[in-house]
Image: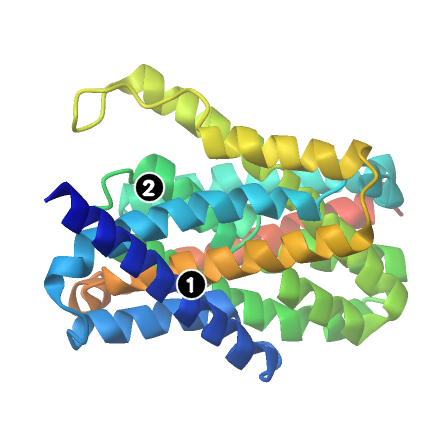
Amino acid sequence: MTTLVSRQNLVSVALLLAIGMLTMLIASFIPGLSALLLAILIGAVIGNVQLVPAKFGPALSWGSKKLLRLGIVLLGFKLSLTSLMEIGLQGILVLVITVGVTFVGTLLLGRSLSASKVTTMLVATGFSICGASAVAAMSSIVDPDEKHEEDTVQAIALVTIFGTLTMFLLPPLATALRLSDMQAGLWIGASVHEVAQVVAAGGMVSAAAMGIATVTKLGRVVLLAPLVSIVGIVRSRGGRDTQGQKPPLLPLFVLGFLAAVLVRTFIPLPGEVFTGLEFGANWLLASAMLGLGFGVNLRKMIATGWKPLILGALSTLLAVLVSLSLILLLQA
């Protein structure tokens, strides 16, 4: 039996990686399309029409979890702490305050809307930090037994919807408000949810704004590790999981993520190496999203109603207004 399960695990990982690569190839030909979202959609279709035997479900779930955590580790190689100096101390202040206010504010909004606690936490994380990757990372902390996969998929869908809206709305608004390239880049980087969306939105303003927006966005990604760690510590103090074990204070994949950031910051390696690692991170995350989508019950997700949509809209508005107010106040 152990051999059979092991074989299913290997087959499942190979399947996830193969289709994950396919989603990346498709997304590369369609500007603005997220490979992660596409992978979730493909996985959801496969799962809901039962194209894969149900016995492979646990193996696909196992493979998805392993690929996700490894992808989060490799994501750290995108980030260099020294690059944050490009936005200056005021820019870092805008970044940190916006992330903190958006996260806490979204939690309070979710409570007032009586939204699901898991959905609220995932939306707060994804909208304040770095979109789908942050949602998936936090999901492994707040939903370790994968009982709320629909919440995770819904949060990622909301990130895509509202990230796309801000991607198109903020550049013309920045021009109308006569923001400088620095101000526009900071605003876009602190407000738009996905890295690809930030790059596209910044490029609509200018090359200089795109550079500042990208650095600002990567600064938000750096905050993923401390945020996940804090939530992990709170949960560890709050009780035990379904197996009677206390969750770890600091998950190993978070430690790996931090180690990767430090390597990128302090160890000079050829650019080709970092490019390969970045490609690997994207591939692993897309493959993990495929497995996540496979376990989703679309009818159950749709039945959650309008509350998550309103929460996503309010969270996005909060990030946009807080960051803009800080930029105008500090750089007046």
Q: In x, y percent, where is residue 162?
A: 51, 66
Q: Is any part of residue 292 visible from this angle? A: no
Q: Residue furthest bottom?
A: 29
Residue 111 disc label: 2
Q: Nearer the viewer, residue 250 or 237?
A: 250
- Name the residue rendered at 62%, 81% in the picture: 31
For label 1, the crowd category at 10 Å Cα-Cα, with few meaning under 14, some 14 to 19 and many 20 or more, is: many
CA gap between label 1 and label 2 equals 38 Å
- Quarter of the picture containing the N terminus is top left
Residue 17 disc label: 1
Q: Would you say 84 lies left or right of 153 here?
A: right
Q: Nearer the viewer, residue 188 or 235?
A: 235
Q: Amino acid at mark 2?
A: Arg
Q: In x, y percent, where is residue 126?
A: 49, 50
CB within 8 Å, label 1 to label 2 = no
Q: Secondary structure at mark 2?
A: helix
- Name the residue rendered at 22%, 68% in the picture: 302
- Name the residue rendered at 15%, 50% in the picture: 4
| Up/down of 220 relative to 53, above or below | above
| Up/down of 295 relative to 58, above or below | below
